[in-house]
Image (cartoon, coloured by chain):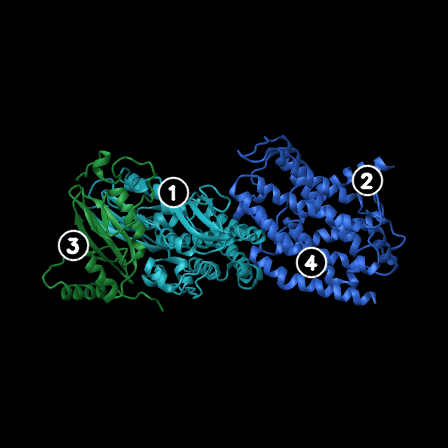
Chain colours: A cyan, B blue, C green
Amino acid sequence: MTKIKVPIGPQHPLLKEPLAFQLTLEGERVVESVMRLGYVHRGMERLCQERTYVQNIYLLERVCGICSHVHATTYCRAVEALMGVEVPQRGVNLRALLCELERVHSHLLWLGVIARNIGFDTIFMYAWRDREMVLDIMEDLSGGRVSHAVNTLGGVRIDLTDEHRNAILAQLDILDVQIQLLLGVVEHEQTLHARTRGVGRLTLEQIHRYCVVGPVARASGLDIDLRRDAPEPPYDRLEFNVPIHTDGDVWARTLVRVQEAVESVSLCRQILHSLPEGQTTVKVPRRVPAGEAISRMEAPRGEVIYYVRSNGTDKPARVKVRTPTLTSLVTLPEQLQDVQMADVSVVLSGVDLCIACADR
Amino acid sequence: MVPFRLLIFPGFLFLFLCAMFFDWVDRRMIALIQQREGPPWYQPFADFIKLLTKEDVLTTGAHAFAATVLPIASLVSVLTAALYIPVAGVASASFDGDFVVVLFLLSIPALTYFLAGWISVGVYSIIGGHRSLLQYFSYEVPFLIALAGPAVLSGSWRIADIVAYQGATIWSALTQPLGFLLAVVGLIGKLKRDPLDIPKAKSEVVGGSLTEFSGRKLALWHLAMDMQTVVGIFLLVNLFLGESRFLEGLPAFPIFGLKALGILLLLSLVSALYARLRIDQLATLGSRWLAPLALLQVVVVLWMRG
Amino acid sequence: MSDFVTRTAEMRELVMNAFVKAFPDEEFAVREVPVNDIVIAVPAGSLAPAVRILVDELGIWHLSTITADDTGDHIHMLYHFWHGSGVTLETQLPLTGSSIETLTGQIPGAAFYEREIFEMFGVVFEGNADLTPLLLPDDWTGPPPMLKSSNGQTESKA
């Protein structure tokens, strides 16, 4: 059978961000795939060395659109650890609130994207309509739908009145019902099962070898979640489940993400109900003392790790960012081996690509 | 009389307006299910006119003559088939055996779609054309068998007679529900609608066979597809929901319109509620379910015939 | 129940005991780094064996990332592992012409990290057959961009 070379990207209706694949097909089967990253490489790590610590918060928020807050929070935590500053509990809780809202937003966005890629436009519309609700909540909280800029060194710059809090709680109730409906669809809809079950399977052993994190790892049976395993406030006093499945295919990943969204809504509620009083921010020293800090957090796609080194000047000497998408991308050549052409879109959607994160 | 029938009703102008109208109803219905508003009534006209004004580009190496002729051939075959399909009892022409001619003419669009992919040089076009042919083999035979059921039962190969036979007895959809179901599934495959829009799956093959087409040629392709929807639905209405003695005395045209819209709404509902199938899943569906059920339907019809 | 359950104090004891047993002639400097990591200094030649101990003996297989840092005098390499709390192995490499043994034989997941460090800092990973550019364009002809020398920066001291 003759082999055809099919390019996927850098521009393709399937991809939301530029990423290039050169697939070699034999009939409808993929026999080889070559991946090329770097289309959105902006040199963030280098740019961080030329900006002050505060300017870097705004820069690093733009590493990714969907997990912007978690990047800024991880960075701030690292710098605050260097400065030896402890953020007041109210500030910590508000940061966590936004992290969880962002997780819901990210998973709903992803559900819409994968639904569209398998031709299931109805779920795409439903998921993105619910996502609008989350975006409205985030906009009321921070002023921005996707880019929030709530973090400062030492805390957050937003606060909640009681009325506002009750309004958010009411919205979360509606959101809960909607997400349960989506969960029902994922669990029971036959055509969705037909397209996603058995596709893109990763065994636990492969997860170990490639050091995969996040929902992709959890869907293959790896019990990892930084919020629970390295509990920082407020997660140390909140109750939540970490959904784990063992199938390792795209359907398992879908289940994990939608169930996580349900858990995140519950977490938001718990945070709002138990928001401590007090300041949201604390004064920080003018200079960051020399030293190193390593900060990790659970972003919607998995573990994000920041290494920050200060040499006592007003600009960091090194900021290293490793985003979770990179760990999923490493598994793609194996996932795409011997897959049908139609499944390529399912596999690529299943790893929840955030190329801006991977390229920085 | 003949020019009126050919050009106005039930000819070209009527079909054109129906194509636009059905497209709008389809999009509106899907939008309602998806809890959004959907486009205004003039959207299909606007899309058509917009495409006519766009630049007509063709890739290097594509067969220019074929690229111009294929969409016209597709449109012409659908319009010719429409000559013999009565709308509320009024047809431009009718003769014994026109049923077979109609089925033949309605298979031409599938061929032209495949050829369009073949002659465009792009990789997506070739894959889309390839898939469309695979899809054609999966649904066409069950579709033809299902449609032949009412013809066999009525003992005539003339559509007008098939309609009249139902007027004397009862709708074929009620005597051959399996055949009706197969015909609807076959129509979804023929029209390349979700969940069987595999040849033009945007996230997989970008635009399928028509990826490289633009401007006037694409406008004609879309018009041909919209008209095929209308003609396909009209054919199904005539064969399965023909005349009925229980509805005698009621104005024929609105009744016909309601039946056609009913089938259209059924198609829209199915489009909205399911994800797209994979080509091998369709092939399995065709061989494991559609073909055997079609054969079963044939056996039942022959038994009913006596 | 989590697959990762070691806390910082336990981690320190666990890893140091294993290293002392495996490398009886060497002294490893350990320090604690916020937020909850321990950093162990390892000579460049012993890095791959040390990783083998972490992965095979102690079951600490999750490599978060590999950081390279141009401190002005040398390239500071950090291998971040995680198992409930973080353990990082650090080593120093010369600024130019440096090379170190690849980890992709033991941990295939290190592939992208090593590729990025190769293109950004110029560190060669021996044994890694695929050091093609990850993020830089194919027609990049300049020096490794993250090296402070190649973009006119110097390591400023406060």
Amino acid type, label 2:
Phe
Compute the Cα span from label 3 to label 2.
88 Å
Amino acid type, label 3:
Gly
Q: Secondary structure at mark 1?
A: loop
Residue A217: image location, x then y, percent: 39, 60
Compute the Cα span from label 1 to label 4.
55 Å
Q: Secondary structure at mark 3?
A: helix
Amino acid type, label 4:
Pro
Which mark is on residue C45?
3
Dot 2: few (<14), some (14–19), or many (≥20) neighbours within 10 Å? some
Q: Secondary structure at mark 2?
A: loop
Q: Secondary structure at mark 4?
A: helix
Amino acid type, label 1:
Arg
Return the residue nearer the eye: A284 or A291. A291
* Chain letter for mark 4: B
* Chain letter for mark 3: C
Decide if residue A310 is on the left or right side of residue B196: left
Residue bearing the label numbered 2: B9
Residue bearing the label numbered 1: A62
Residue drawn where x is 64% and y is 46% of the image: B37
Query: Farthest residue toward the bottom?
Result: C1
Query: Farthest residue toward the left?
Result: C25
Q: Which numbered disc, 1 or 4, marks the residue closer to the eye?
A: 4
Return the residue nearer the eye: B206 or C94. B206
Q: Are the residues under badges 3 and 2 in a single subunit?
A: no
